[in-house]
């Protein structure tokens, strides 16, 4: 009877997790291999195909990739509070003042407008575009509505907002709205609460923390170089957005240039690789774009002060609330993507990477190239369908082919060689090899292959210890029109 109960609970958990893509592979890579496993045994206790062997959970049967083990583990990030911190309530909202040209719903600017109009604050700390160098962030103190209206919109680079905050206090302002990314908010929080924090000692001020959501920000010079390399004139750019994995530059003449955010990894600020706070967990009110329709902002109210300010701004007609709240699922998904950097690893392993220096784009191999191996071409193993290949994509101005391979065999595969070669009239004209020592079930691996000139067809071969597992073709001619 008790065994039956366990089975019923297991299958209910499986149903609830359907489509989450959590798996045993993720448990091993994120928790066990990184050394943060507490050896509690919850994963092994959960599933019949896991055993505790040599101080870790080991797969001894066929894994279905259901992810129940992952969700029992005390070290995985699957609970809402672990992902976005505590909050009282959430809204989708926008400014009512048509003069506010916000990044999303203009909620940040509308909140400050309300606070300034009512005399509740002396000033606000915002970030403007530097008039001397376009799109360079300029941390600023604003006292009037006219100044404020120039400050809306996002600049995706670090801004030294704390310098502006302390200047405002030095100038005698004592009630201040502060806008910042989660790292900026953390600085204010620490300075206000820690025993050695200046704002906790004699230099007190009432600071309302308006925290932005933030996935990453970029080094100003590298971003400028990226734009120049892609024919985008920084002085002509009207707006930049980061949404749904795409970095978009919108120019004054309406030209739109869009890139996977991943393409800008080279320009990303290094600190952002170690950052785990998406939603400004230490703020009074957090505001972001993800989770709300275009033209609306997602708002998380975290403190009593934040609640009062937001409600009063709504009551006084500065902010309009959408009847439909934000998609918490979308916010939590993005928050999790960020929190996994806690494990100092990427969700996917990418095997060929590019980096940009002053000299332009250069190819760099991440792992040692495995020696080439004679392969017996048999189709029998291919029928096992052990590896699934995603639809190939062209990225970085069509210079790179990106594919994702997933181990769908249900078993860990060892010493796997992935060979990607360009084939022209039966001859191999370029070849890339990578060796994967362990490939866990349902783990996705991303490969980026630089295209060669006048390419036609690439052959992707995955070979395990004994023989070939899978072959697949990439026909470039078919890919280009599809993508356009
Ligand atoms: C670096 C960065 C990364 C972001 N990443 C994400 C993300 O991944 N997902 C997501 O949902 N939202 C992200 N956002 C937040 C989003 O872009 C909007 O700022 C947010 O939705 C508020 O929009 P709004 O229209 O209500 O604000 P607005 O009324 O347009 O006001 C925006 C406020 O942000 C200030 N600001 C602009 N740039 C900076 C900066 N670099 N540092 C500090 N303050 C600044 C402005 O001065 C202004 O006060 C990011 C913002 C930044 C600055
Ligand atoms: S993901 Fe695999 S190992 Fe984990 S509970 Fe499901 S079947 Fe078991
Ligand atoms: S449940 Fe997590 S912490 Fe516990 S033994 Fe398994 S992997 Fe380690
Ligand atoms: S990702 Fe983190 S460190 Fe980088 S700007 Fe955003 S909050 Fe700051």
Image (spheres, rainbow, N blue to C red):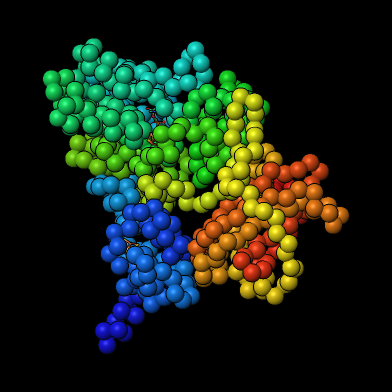
Q: Which residue is rendered at x = 73% and y = 62% of the image?
A: 374
In the drawing, does residue 40 fall left or right of residue 379?
left
Q: Is residue 172 above or below residue 41?
A: above
Toward the bottom, the furthest residue is: 1
Toward the right, the furthest residue is: 425
Residue 263 percent location from the top left of the image: 58, 39
Q: Which residue is rendered at x = 39% and y = 24% of the image?
A: 159
Residue 412 percent location from the top left of the image: 51, 67
Q: Which residue is rendered at x = 32% and y = 30% of the image?
A: 184
Residue 372 percent location from the top left of the image: 70, 55
The answer to which image quadrant residue 185 occupies is top left
Report whether residue 447 is seen.
yes
Q: Is residue 336 above or below residue 380?
A: above
The answer to which image quadrant residue 138 occupies is top left
Viewer-proximal residue among 435 and 114: 435
Viewer-proximal residue among 379 and 99: 379
Viewer-proximal residue among 196 and 323: 196
In the drawing, does residue 388 fall left or right of residue 292?
right
Quadrant for the C terminus in the image: top right
Q: Which image quadrant shows ligand 3? A: bottom left
Quadrant for the N terminus in the image: bottom left
In the drawing, does residue 60 fall left or right of residue 396?
left
The answer to which image quadrant residue 302 occupies is top left
Q: Is residue 198 above or below residue 277?
A: above
Report whether residue 104 is seen.
no
Residue 229 percent location from the top left of the image: 64, 28
Q: Which residue is rendered at x = 36% and y = 18% of the image?
A: 140
């Amino acid at each position: 009877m008790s065994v039956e109960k366990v089975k019923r609970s297991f299958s209910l958990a499986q149903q609830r997790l359907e489509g989450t893509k959590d798996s045993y592979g993720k448990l091993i890579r994120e928790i066990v291999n990184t050394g943060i496993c507490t050896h509690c045994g919850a994963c092994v206790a959960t599933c019949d195909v896991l055993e505790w062997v040599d101080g870790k959970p080991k797969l001894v049967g066929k894994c279905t990739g259901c992810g129940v083990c992952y969700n029992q583990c005390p070290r995985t990030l699957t609970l809402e509070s672990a992902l976005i911190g505590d909050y009282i309530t959430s809204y989708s909202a926008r400014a009512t003042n048509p003069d506010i040209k916000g990044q999303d719903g203009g909620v940040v600017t509308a909140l400050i407008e309300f606070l300034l109009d009512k005399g509740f604050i002396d000033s606000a700390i915002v970030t403007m575009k530097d008039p001397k160098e376009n799109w360079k962030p300029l941390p600023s103190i604003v006292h009037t509505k006219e100044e404020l209206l120039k400050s809306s919109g996002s600049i995706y680079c670090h801004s030294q907002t704390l310098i502006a905050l302390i200047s405002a206090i030095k100038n005698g302002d004592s009630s201040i709205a502060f806008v910042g990314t989660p790292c900026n908010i953390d600085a204010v929080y620490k300075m206000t609460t820690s025993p050695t924090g200046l704002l906790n000692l004699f230099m007190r001020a009432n600071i309302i923390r308006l925290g932005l959501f933030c996935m990453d920000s970029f080094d100003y010079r590298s971003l400028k170089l990226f734009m120049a390399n892609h024919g985008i004139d920084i002085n002509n750019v009207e707006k930049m957005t980061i949404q749904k994995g795409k970095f978009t530059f919108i120019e004054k003449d309406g030209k739109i240039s869009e890139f996977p955010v991943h393409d800008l990894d080279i320009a990303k600020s290094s600190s952002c690789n170690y950052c785990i706070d998406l939603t400004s967990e230490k703020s009074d009110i957090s505001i972001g774009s993800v989770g709300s329709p275009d033209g609306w902002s997602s708002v998380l109210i975290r403190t009593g002060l934040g609640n009062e300010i937001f409600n009063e701004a709504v009551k006084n007609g500065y902010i309009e609330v959408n009847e439909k709240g934000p998609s918490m699922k979308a916010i939590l998904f993005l928050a999790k993507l960020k929190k996994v950097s806690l494990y100092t690893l990427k969700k996917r392993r990418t095997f060929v990477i590019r980096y940009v220096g002053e000299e332009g784009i250069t190819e760099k191999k991440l792992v040692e190239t495995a020696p080439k191996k004679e392969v017996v071409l048999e189709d029998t193993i291919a029928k096992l369908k052990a590896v699934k290949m995603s639809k190939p994509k062209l990225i970085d101005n069509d210079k790179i082919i990106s594919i994702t391979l997933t181990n769908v065999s249900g078993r860990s595969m060892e010493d796997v060689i992935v060979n990607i070669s360009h084939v022209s009239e039966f001859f191999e004209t370029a070849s890339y090899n990578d060796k994967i020592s362990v490939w866990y079930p349902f783990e996705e691996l991303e490969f980026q292959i630089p295209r060669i000139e006048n390419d036609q067809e690439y052959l992707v071969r995955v070979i395990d210890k004994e023989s070939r597992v899978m072959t697949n073709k990439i026909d470039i001619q078919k890919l280009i029109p599809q993508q356009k």
